[in-house]
């Protein structure tokens, strides 16, 4: 490789060069901290840079030192504080509505072996297990993978598992360790016994209605349509909470102009004015663009005249509009989303 090639190294390839410079124990310790996909990418890059020159090593080291000097940020987990503030300000129901839209999905997996198995393998392991065990393990997965696993399980147990995920709470370290051992024993050839644990000194909290909704939203619409009615029979309160977290105000923007116009014509002007106070200009433009110029100007004037508005009022109005949209969809008056099998 030439010096010019070194300047075109990707970030992964630069990391691979550094990995080749440290000792085997240090390299192994670093790999244990990475996710499976990161391990695969870094391992592949290490083969590519095996013939790196001395000049190229110096370039990589200089780049590393420069980047290290630029790092001054201090990381912390803001989620507990944000949830507490939101709940105190808005109450549990409204806080859940806001957090469902703004909370990033959690990437951490408490049972590390799950990271190294695909959805089919996990479903095979869980097929014969008690639904509560399945619920805990699925709640540990990335939502996209969890959705796949849920769909691979028998249709009859999917509503029960989703209900249990919604009702999950604190899990003791001992319980998680037992599940880790069970999973390693069931997953033949997976090599799970060698994986370290992440942060298991304290209990962990899993699941909840937002997590259940996140998993279900990643599944096919036909799965939602089949599972939700059965979930209402199991627990109406939980099903309603999942339904509210499953569909938020921003989802209305997925409708085409024709259906959005139908919704607007069936919504009270006062509710629409209050609801649009809480969205960004782009979303507001979508709604106003489906109205006549005169009606849109009237909404803009009314929003300006009202001045600042309490967030709770905005959320109440958005909830009203979501309710109208659901009812119109159930009546067949409008179509949500772009598919024939959409469910609201």
Image: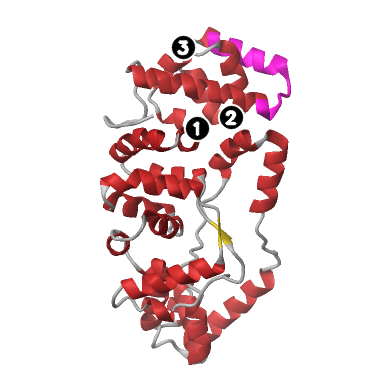
Q: Earlier in the sequence, mark 3 or mark 2?
A: 3
| Position of residue 217 in the picture relative to residue 312 (left or right) | left
**Image point (71%, 16%), residue name:** 306
**Image point (41%, 59%), residue name:** 133
Query: For this rendering, which residue is in front, 28 or 58?
Result: 28
Q: CA distance from mark 3 to mark 2?
A: 20 Å
Per the image, the residue denoted by label 1 is 250
The image position of residue 201, as x and y in percent, is: 61, 71
Question: Dot 3: within a 10 Å radius of its alpha carbon, few (fewer than 14), some, or many (20 or more) residues?
Answer: few
Q: Earlier in the sequence, mark 1 or mark 3?
A: 1
Region in magenta: 295-312
Disc 2 element: loop
| Position of residue 147 in the picture relative to residue 244 (left or right) | left
Per the image, the residue denoted by label 2 is 279
| Position of residue 134 in the picture relative to residue 31 (left or right) | left
Q: Is residue 80 magenta?
A: no
The image position of residue 202, as x and y in percent, is: 61, 67
């Amino acid at each position: 490789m030439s010096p010019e090639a070194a300047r075109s190294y990707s970030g992964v390839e630069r990391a691979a060069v550094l990995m080749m410079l440290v000792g085997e124990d240090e390299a192994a310790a670093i790999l244990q901290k990475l996710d499976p996909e990161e391990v695969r990418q870094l391992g592949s890059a290490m083969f590519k840079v095996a013939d790196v020159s001395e000049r190229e090593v110096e370039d990589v080291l200089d780049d590393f030192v420069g980047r290290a000097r630029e790092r001054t940020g201090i990381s912390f987990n803001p989620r507990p504080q944000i949830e507490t503030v939101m709940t105190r300000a808005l109450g549990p129901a409204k806080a859940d509505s806001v957090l469902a839209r703004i909370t990033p999905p959690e990437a951490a997996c408490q049972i590390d072996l799950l990271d190294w198995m695909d959805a089919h393998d996990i479903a095979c392991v869980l097929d014969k297990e008690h639904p509560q065990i399945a619920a805990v393990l699925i709640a540990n997965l990335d939502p996209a993978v969890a959705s796949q696993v849920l769909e691979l399980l028998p249709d009859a147990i999917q509503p029960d598992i989703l209900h249990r995920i919604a009702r999950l709470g604190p899990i003791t370290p001992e319980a998680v360790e037992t599940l880790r051992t069970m999973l390693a024993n069931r997953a033949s050839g997976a090599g799970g016994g060698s994986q370290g644990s992440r942060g298991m000194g304290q209990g962990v909290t899993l699941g909840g209605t937002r997590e259940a909704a996140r998993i279900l939203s990643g599944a096919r619409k036909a799965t939602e349509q089949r599972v939700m009615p059965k979930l209402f029979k199991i627990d109406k309160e939980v099903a309603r909470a999942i339904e509210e977290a499953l569909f938020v105000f921003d989802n209305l923007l997925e409708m085409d102009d024709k259906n959005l116009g139908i919704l607007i014509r069936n919504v009270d002007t006062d509710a629409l004015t209050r609801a649009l106070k809480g969205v960004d200009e782009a979303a507001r433009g979508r709604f106003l663009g489906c109205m006549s110029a005169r009606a849109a100007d009237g909404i803009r004037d009314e929003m300006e005249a009202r001045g600042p508005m309490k967030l709770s009022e905005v959320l109440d109005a958005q909830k009203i509009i979501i309710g109208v949209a659901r009812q119109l969809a159930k009546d067949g008056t409008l179509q949500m989303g772009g598919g024939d099998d959409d469910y609201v």
